[in-house]
Image (cartoon, rainbow, N blue to C red):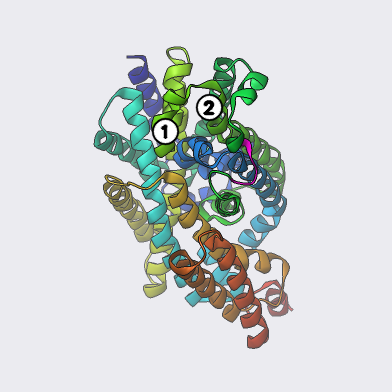
C-alpha cells in the first residue's frame, strides 16, 4: 500500500509542475525561452537526463559480469568527461546563443552553413534515439513491476502515461524541473542502496575480503578488459555530446548560470557513479553465491533484488522510485530531441513556410507516437541493457562530438568536413559492429574515422562556411 501511495504522490507532483510550467510557444516548449536561472536545477537535471534505468539496473548489476574493471573505468570516465563537459559548457551556450539555435542539428547547420548536414544528423538521431529508448523502457517496466506488483506490459503502459503527461504539457521547462527532482531522488537512492549493501556485508573491509580474486582482477578475468574499457568510454562520451543533454545547456539564462551549474553537475555524477557502479562487485562480498547465482545470467535484476531484500520496508520503495525517476528523466529528454529533430529540423527543411504553432502541435503529437512505438518495441527485449545502450548512445555521441568540438575551437571547419565526419562516423561504427574485432569498441573506430574525414574534408574544400570567422567577416 505504501508503494502505491508513493507513486500516486509522485504522479500528482509531476502533473502539478507540468501544468504550472506549461508552454504555448515553440521556443518555450523546446528551449524554455533560455530562462532557467538556477545552476543547481540545470546541473542536477543534466545528471538525471544522462543516467537512466540503464545505469540504475544495467550499470549497477554489470559489475557481477565484468568485475572491478567495470567499476574503475565507468567511474573514471564518467567523472572525467563530466568535468570536461562542464568546462566547455559556457562556450557551447555562447555558440547556441550566437546562432539562435533551438536544436543541436540546427546549431551545427548554422555553424557550418550546411542544411544537408543538419538533415543527416537529425536522421541519425531519430533512428538511434528510437533504439536507445527501448532498453530504457525495459528497465522502467521492470521497476514498476517491482514497485507496485503490476505485470511487465502494465508497467510499460504506466511509464508511457506518466512521461506523456509532462512531455505534452510542459516541454523542456517541465523536463528540466521534474528532472531536478528526479535527480535528487536518484542520488539519494544510490547512496541509500550503497550504504545498505555495506551494512549487510559488515563494512567495506569485511566485504572486500570475501570478493573472489577473479572479480577484483583488473586484467579482465571474467570479461576482457578491452571490452569493458570500450563500453565505459562509449557510454561516458555521451556526457560531452548527447543532444538531450546539450539542450539543457542551451536553456540557461546566461553563462553565469552555466558556470555555477558546473559545480553541481560533475559532483552529482561522481556520487551517483561511484555508488551505483560499485554494487555488482560489492554484492559478491555481501551475499551468498546461491543468492547471486540467478543474477549472473541476468545482472539487470540485481538492483531491485538488493532494494527489496537489504533495506527496511518503505526504503525499498524509495529506491525503486529513484530508479523509475532515472528512467523517466532520460525518456522525456530523448523524446523531446528526437521529435524536434523530425519536426523542427527535417520537416521544416522540406516545408520552410510551416508556422511555429504547427511545428509545436506536431512536436507534441509525434512525441506521443514515439513514446508508444518505443514501449511496444520494448515488450520483448532479450538483450542486457548495458550493451544496447553502449552502442546506440555511443554512435550518437560520436557523430555529434567531432563537429561540435572542432566547431568550438577550430575556425577552418567546413560544411564538407561536417558532412564527411557524420557519414564516416556512422558508417564506420555500423560496419565495425558487424565485422570488426569485438575487443575494440566501435565508437573508437567512429571517432577516428570521423576526425580524419572532418579534417580531410575541411582542408580539401577550402574556406570555412558559417563559422565564427565567417560571421565576423559578414559583420565587417
Q: Where does residue 430 sit, x and y in percent of width and height?
A: 45, 67
Q: Quadrant of residue 151?
A: top left
Which of 289/452 is in front? Answer: 289
Residue in view at x 70 percent, y 51 percent: 84
Most extreme residue toward the right is 476
Q: Decide whether residue 217 is among the magenta residues.
A: yes
Within 10 Å of disc 1 (Cα), the crowding (few <14, some 14-19, many 20+) is: some
For image coordinates 65% across by 47% down, the residue present is 77
Identify which residue, 192 or 214, lies in the foreground: 214
Taking the spot 67% from the left edge, 21% from the top edge, the residue there is: 205
Tell me where residue 42 appears, x and y as whole percent. 60, 41
Please state the horizontal and vertical placement of residue 308, each as a whole percent of the image.
42, 20
Do the residues bearing badges 1 and 2 touch, measured as CB atoms within 8 Å? yes
In the image, residue 209 sits, relative to residue 400, either above or below, namely: above
Compared to 24, does 446 lie above or below? below
Judge whether residue 466 can be spotted in this image: no
Q: CA distance from mark 1 to mark 2?
A: 11 Å
Tell me the number on the disc at residue 171.
none
Task: Give the labeled residue for mark 1.
Answer: 295
State the residue lying farthest toward the top: 312
Report the front residue among 343 and 442: 442
Kindly state the secondary structure of the residue where label 2 is placed: helix
Q: Which residues are magenta?
A: 216-220
Q: Residues within 10 Å of mark 2 (few under 14, many from 20)?
A: many
Q: Position of residue 462 (x, y in %)?
A: 67, 87
What is the secondary structure assignment of the residue under circle 1?
helix
The residue that mark 2 highlights is 283
Please indicate whether residue 430 sits to the left or right of residue 412 in the image.
Answer: left
Q: Is residue 108 left or right of residue 157?
A: right
Q: Earlier in the sequence, mark 1 or mark 2?
A: 2
Amino acid at each position: 500500500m505504501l508503494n502505491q501511495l508513493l507513486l500516486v504522490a509522485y504522479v500528482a507532483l509531476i502533473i502539478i509542475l507540468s501544468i504550472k510550467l506549461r508552454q504555448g510557444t515553440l521556443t518555450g516548449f523546446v528551449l524554455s525561452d533560455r530562462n532557467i536561472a538556477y545552476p543547481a536545477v540545470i546541473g542536477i537535471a543534466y545528471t538525471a537526463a544522462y543516467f537512466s534505468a540503464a545505469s540504475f539496473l544495467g550499470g549497477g548489476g554489470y559489475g557481477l559480469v565484468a568485475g572491478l574493471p567495470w567499476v574503475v573505468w565507468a567511474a573514471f570516465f564518467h567523472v572525467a568527461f563530466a568535468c570536461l563537459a562542464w568546462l566547455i559548457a559556457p562556450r557551447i551556450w555562447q555558440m547556441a546563443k550566437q546562432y539562435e539555435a533551438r536544436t543541436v542539428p540546427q546549431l551545427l547547420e548554422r555553424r557550418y552553413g550546411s542544411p544537408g548536414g543538419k538533415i543527416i544528423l537529425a536522421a541519425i538521431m531519430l533512428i538511434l534515439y528510437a533504439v536507445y529508448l527501448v532498453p530504457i523502457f525495459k528497465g522502467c517496466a521492470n521497476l514498476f513491476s517491482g514497485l507496485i506488483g503490476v505485470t511487465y506490459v502494465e508497467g510499460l503502459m504506466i511509464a508511457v502515461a506518466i512521461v506523456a503527461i509532462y512531455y505534452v504539457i510542459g516541454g523542456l521547462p517541465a523536463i528540466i524541473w521534474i528532472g531536478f527532482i528526479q535527480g535528487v531522488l536518484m542520488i539519494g537512492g544510490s547512496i541509500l542502496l550503497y550504504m545498505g549493501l555495506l551494512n549487510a556485508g559488515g563494512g567495506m573491509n569485511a566485504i572486500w575480503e570475501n570478493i573472489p580474486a577473479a572479480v577484483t582482477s583488473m586484467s579482465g578475468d571474467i570479461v576482457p578488459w578491452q571490452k569493458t574499457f570500450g563500453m565505459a568510454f562509449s557510454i561516458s562520451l555521451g556526457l560531452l555530446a548527447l543532444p538531450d543533454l546539450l539542450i539543457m545547456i542551451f536553456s540557461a539564462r546566461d553563462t553565469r548560470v552555466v558556470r555555477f551549474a558546473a559545480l553541481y553537475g560533475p559532483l552529482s555524477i561522481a556520487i551517483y557513479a561511484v555508488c551505483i557502479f560499485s554494487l555488482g562487485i560489492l554484492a559478491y562480498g555481501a551475499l551468498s553465491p546461491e543468492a547471486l547465482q540467478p543474477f549472473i545470467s541476468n545482472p539487470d535484476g540485481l538492483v531491485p533484488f538488493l532494494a527489496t531484500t537489504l533495506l527496511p520496508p518503505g526504503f525499498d520503495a524509495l529506491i525503486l522510485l529513484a530508479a523509475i525517476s532515472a528512467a523517466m528523466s532520460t525518456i522525456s529528454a530523448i523524446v523531446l530531441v528526437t521529435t524536434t529533430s523530425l519536426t523542427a529540423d527535417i520537416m521544416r527543411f522540406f516545408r520552410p513556410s510551416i508556422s511555429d504553432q504547427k511545428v509545436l502541435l506536431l512536436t507534441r503529437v509525434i512525441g506521443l507516437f514515439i513514446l508508444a512505438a518505443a514501449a511496444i518495441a520494448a515488450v520483448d527485449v532479450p538483450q542486457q541493457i548495458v550493451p544496447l545502450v553502449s552502442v546506440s548512445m555511443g554512435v550518437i555521441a560520436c557523430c555529434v562530438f567531432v563537429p561540435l568540438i572542432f566547431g568550438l575551437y577550430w575556425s577552418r571547419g567546413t560544411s564538407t568536413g561536417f558532412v564527411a565526419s557524420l557519414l564516416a562516423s556512422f558508417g564506420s561504427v555500423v560496419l565495425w559492429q558487424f565485422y570488426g574485432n569485438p575487443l575494440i569498441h566501435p565508437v573508437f573506430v567512429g571517432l577516428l574515422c570521423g576526425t580524419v574525414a572532418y579534417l580531410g574534408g575541411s582542408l580539401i574544400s577550402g574556406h570555412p562556411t558559417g563559422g565564427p570567422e565567417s560571421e565576423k567577416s559578414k559583420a565587417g
